[in-house]
Amino acid sequence: MPNHRPAPEPPPPGGILWDIAGDVRALLALPAALTMQVAHPAVGAGVDTYSVFRTDPWGRGERSLRSLQTWVYGGQSAADEGRRLRALHRDIRGTDAHGRDYHALTPAYYAWVHATGFPVYHHAQKYLGRPFTEAQQRQLYAEWLQVGRILGIHDRDMPQTLEEFWPYFDKMLADEIELTAVAQELVAVDQPVPPPDRGPRALRLVLRTLWPVLRPPLAHFRRFITIGLMPPDARSAIGLPWTPVQERRLRRFGRVVRTVVPLLPERLRYLPMARRARARRTRLPQGNRVRRAGRIRREAAALYQ
């Protein structure tokens, strides 16, 4: 009989990802992770050839965000989303800028796309929230490994502990990462970006009218936040400039964000899928929540014994 392995479960409700992945502050950190991903020549080549990020940037962003939210808050549908993504990438192949053949599902390339999320969450938290303790870093990494399993990445292709992750990350930055054409495009301020085509019709009309005025400062802010929330060693490996003046501005911006956002009501602080999942969890009977929390703590502890 065939060996049917159970589908991997998403990160646990009540965990660290449960709190930060759906918080609106995560929207500020995503561009840094995306730029790090496409700074790998194989990933950048695939995005350059197959992605619609130039012709449909808002739709592409919305779909990517929905997918990411499903990994964390999707429950039983998280594994389905992981399988859908692998099927979507099955035919993505070609030649990168160095003349090397690539395939999107090559384990080393697919694992790098996943890996970028952890260092960006880790670094951005220092500005946008309260820095993680060592125990929280380990818990976050354990949960991020679970996301990797959702995406169909084997444990053998992901560093299994923090002690293994950081040398892997340093080696990737030293040996693979560079300022690819797509990475350069993502931090450029002169790219033609159409006005948003999502949201209420009245808002879209206003934005379309004001877009020639709004686009330049928004492009500069996107570059600022993308480079600033990128780990400094990744920023250096890609070749992106960052000055002490910019660092002071980012710290001031971060102080405002981490003061204001926690004061927002739930409906403004969390993205819709996260908000719905959190609301469902609060309706669980107390006994169920206690048993689930105990199981989560035991599993997290077992990972590092």
Image (tube, rainbow, N blue to C red):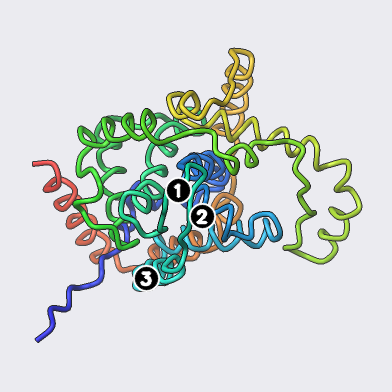
The reply to whether the C-beta atoms of the residues labelled 2 and 3 are less than 8 Å apart is no
Who's the residue at 20% across and 53% down the image? 155
The quadrant in which residue 150 appears is bottom left
Q: Position of residue 66 (x, y in %)?
A: 52, 62
Who's the residue at 63% across and 19% down the image? 246
| Side of 92 relative to 76 (left or right) | right
Disc 1 crowd, CA 10 A, few/some/many (<14, 14-19, 20+): many
Q: Earlier in the sequence, mark 1 or mark 3?
A: 1
CA separation in Å, label 2 and label 3:
19 Å
The reply to whether the C-beta atoms of the residues labelled 2 and 1 are less than 8 Å apart is yes
CA separation in Å, label 1 and label 3:
21 Å
Q: Label 2 is placed on what type of residue?
A: Gly
| Side of 112 relative to 292 (left or right) | right
Q: Residue furthest front?
A: 99
Disc 2 crowd, CA 10 A, few/some/many (<14, 14-19, 20+): many
Q: Label 1 is placed on what type of residue?
A: Ala
CA separation in Å, label 2 and label 1:
6 Å
Query: From the viewer's perspective, is residue 61 above or below residue 133?
Result: below
**Numbered circle sitting on residue 42:** 1
Return the residue nearer the eye: 302 or 277.
Answer: 302
Instruction: Name the residue that disc number 3 marks.
Output: 83
